Image (cartoon, rainbow, N blue to C red):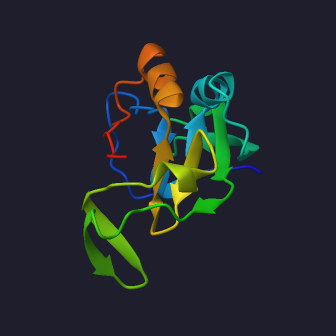
Amino acid sequence: MEVDKILDDNLEEVDQPPIMYAFFPHVNLMSTRLVQTLASAGVDNLEIFPARITDPNTGAVYDDYCAVNVVGLVECADMGKSEHTPLADVYTFRELVIVPEKTMGLPLFRLAESPIDIIVNEQVANAIRNANFPELVLEPVMP
């Protein structure tokens, strides 16, 4: 799979290159380094496709990215203990409490009740912290 453009064609000229984060969740792009970090922490439920990002202003090409699909949704939110608001057919969580027994032992998964949220176990969280991805926000959930 090839991603030719991430940046909008209508961007103004800028004097400095764009900030290339490790994860662009709105388009499911991860840096190769982040994918490798997740794999080394035991994550094996990702579909990974090489991607190329081209900056339309400069022509710079970034080919150390992957389009990533997290395989599987896990329904494990304790809706009685979580603070949430319904939004269409999903929920937004102010405080998420999960039922650990329902996670099937997966180290990383999308939350069925809020598919935009990716949940990781402590081993994966530590691997992310140790690999120094300062732009990734890890918020604890309550078991």
115 sits left or right of 137 in the view: right
Residue placed furthest toward the front: 101
Residue drawn at the location 64% of the way across and 50% of the way down: 104
Residue drawn at the location 28% of the way across and 63% of the way down: 93
Q: Nearer the viewer, residue 21 or 59?
A: 21
Q: Residue 26, how many percent across, how many down? A: 47, 57
41 sits left or right of 138 in the view: right
Q: Nearer the viewer, residue 137 or 111?
A: 111
Looking at the image, residue 86 lies above or below residue 44: below
Numbered circles on residues, count: 0
Residue drawn at the location 41% of the way across and 20% of the way down: 129
Q: Is residue 28 visible?
A: no
Looking at the image, residue 97 lies above or below residue 14: below
Q: Is residue 49 visible?
A: yes
Q: Residue 135, how many percent across, how many down? A: 35, 31
128 sits left or right of 45 in the view: left
Q: Residue 14, how many percent across, how many down? A: 32, 37
Residue 79's quadrant in the figure? bottom left
Residue 8's quadrant in the figure? bottom left
Q: Nearer the viewer, residue 89 or 31?
A: 89
Q: Residue 139, how many percent across, how many down? A: 31, 40
